[in-house]
Image: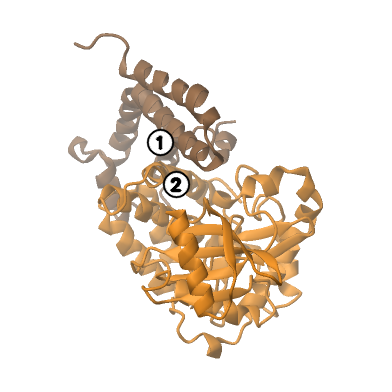
């Protein structure tokens, strides 16, 4: 259930981002325009995370359940700890695939234009 | 603020026996841990462009003090590597704090311009070879002259990176995997060398004929010279031009050819790969250090906050290098 009216949080963030891009950034000296672009990039991360986090979290949870079996342990922290403790071996192909797939989901929100991500989804 | 600084620079230079006027003082967007200013210095004999680099005064685990950086730069210059001339060093708080002044080497340091502007198209052809040459010169300086530079043997450095990563309590499975992977790699033992520590576009001044100067020496150490070679070849410093392994402009062969034109060390591609993995992880941990300096309240900075979400760039590069045949 949602008690908040439109604009949704995504729509609000989009409005601020557009404002910065079209009305603010163009009127600033270079070093402040650069910082404004960073602000716009940050807002775009927030937007993509809002739009996709439920699906990406659900899919990641499935990957973790497959790999770590115990549902209570199926989280990122546990995965990190099992790698550190040597419980999951470096040669384990399922582990490698899980690391690839979860990382792709993270970068699809953080920076989908990143060269390596673009290369890997081709 | 800048008028006050202008007077301070004039006074400081006068104290060093250099009399003249400072004008056109402008801040440059530069390194995250230091202020950089450009200005014109003129007196009746000449007018020249200079750079002021100023530290925060706080000792950082990553960087040497600005006054130390300048002293190191002076000594490297005498070895023939392309380094800007140091004009004066301030280590006293009464002057400019921890800072130094150097002459401006004309050229471009912004990576995207160097990689895309037509005026650098000839420079780009030679740059990989020239970078190899310059690194080999830096790596061949006599260490007796650099006793104050921190020693960072690579295994100790990896331990330190791991502890730093752990201190933030942000679990990153890809980092855990990579630390374990690096643990079981054989690092070829090499003679200790002066390591620049941040040799990449952004810290190189480029003109139309290629490499003009190596700047930003704050991460300098004594250690394995392969660190600089791997660092120059990571995807983080290709600025989108990922098919060109060296800095987004060159091939590994040309880079290593340039290196071996000066140095006798033999380097193979597999070894470079291990150091690319290490370099990518090191950049990832540096991103964490930067974002946590924001999150802990030490500095309030949008840039530092944003860099936290660049950690996943290093993770995707790591899985690509480790599992998917990435170069």
Image chain in brown: A
Subunit of mark 2?
A: B
Identify the element where label 2 is drawn: helix
Return the mark for residue B286: none
Instruction: Measuring from the top left, give residue B165's x and y in whole percent.
Output: 32, 57
Residue at numbered disc 2 = B315
**Residue sitting at the far right:** B122
Q: In whole angstroms, how far apart are the C-alphas of marks 1 and 2? A: 9 Å
Instruction: Measuring from the top left, give residue B303's x and y in whole percent.
Output: 41, 44
Residue drawn at (52%, 43%), measured in percent from left and top? A31
Residue at numbered disc 1 = A106
Are circles 1 and 2 on residues that touch, CB within 8 Å?
A: yes
* In the depicted structure, whether residue B42 falls above or below residue B224: above
Residue drawn at (58%, 65%), measured in percent from left and top? B21
Visible in this render: residue A80?
A: yes
* In the depicted structure, whether residue A17 falls above or below residue B250: above
Image chain in orange: B
**Residue sitting at the far top:** A5
Instruction: Measuring from the top left, give residue B18's x and y in whole percent.
Output: 58, 77
Q: Which of B127 and A113 is in front in this view?
A: B127
């Amino acid at each position: 259930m949602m008690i908040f009216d439109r604009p949704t949080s995504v729509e609000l963030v989009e409005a601020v981002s557009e404002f910065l891009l079209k009305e603010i950034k163009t009127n600033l000296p270079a070093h402040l325009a650069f910082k404004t672009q960073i602000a716009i990039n940050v807002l775009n991360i927030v937007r993509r995370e809002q739009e996709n986090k439920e699906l990406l979290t659900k899919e990641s949870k499935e990957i973790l359940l497959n790999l770590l079996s115990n549902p209570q342990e199926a989280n990122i922290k546990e995965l990190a700890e099992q790698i550190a403790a040597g419980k999951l071996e470096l040669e384990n192909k399922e582990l490698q695939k899980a690391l690839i797939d979860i990382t792709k989901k993270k970068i699809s929100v953080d920076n989908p234009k990143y060269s390596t991500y673009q290369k890997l989804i081709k | 603020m800048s008028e006050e600084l202008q007077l301070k620079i004039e006074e400081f230079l006068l104290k060093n026996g250099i009399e003249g006027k400072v004008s056109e003082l402008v801040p440059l967007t530069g390194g995250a841990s230091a202020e950089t200013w450009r200005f014109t210095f003129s007196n009746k004999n000449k007018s020249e462009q200079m750079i002021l680099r100023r530290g925060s005064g706080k000792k950082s685990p990553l960087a040497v003090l600005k006054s130390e950086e300048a002293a190191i730069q002076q000594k490297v210059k005498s070895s023939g590597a392309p380094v800007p001339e140091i004009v004066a060093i301030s280590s006293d708080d009464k002057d400019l704090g921890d800072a130094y002044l150097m002459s401006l080497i004309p050229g471009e340091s912004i990576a995207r311009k160097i990689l895309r502007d037509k005026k650098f198209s000839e420079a780009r052809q030679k740059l990989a070879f020239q970078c190899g040459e310059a690194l080999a010169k830096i790596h061949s300086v006599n260490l007796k002259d650099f006793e104050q530079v921190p020693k960072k043997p690579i295994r100790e450095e990896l331990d330190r990176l791991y502890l730093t990563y752990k201190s933030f309590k942000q679990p990153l499975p890809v980092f855990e995997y990579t630390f374990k992977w690096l643990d079981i790699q054989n690092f070829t033992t090499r003679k200790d060398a002066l390591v620049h520590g941040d040799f990449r576009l952004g810290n190189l001044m480029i003109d139309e004929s290629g490499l003009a100067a190596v700047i930003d020496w704050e991460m300098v150490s004594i250690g394995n010279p392969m660190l600089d070679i791997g660092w120059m070849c990571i995807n983080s410093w290709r600025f989108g031009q990922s098919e060109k392994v060296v800095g987004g402009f060159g091939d590994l062969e040309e880079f290593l050819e340039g290196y071996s034109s000066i140095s006798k060390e033999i380097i193979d591609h597999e070894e470079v790969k291990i150091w690319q993995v290490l370099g990518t992880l090191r950049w990832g941990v540096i991103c964490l250090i930067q974002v946590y300096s924001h999150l802990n309240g030490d500095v309030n900075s949008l840039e530092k906050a944003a860099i936290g979400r660049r950690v996943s760039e290093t993770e995707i590069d790591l899985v690509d290098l480790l599992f998917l045949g990435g170069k």
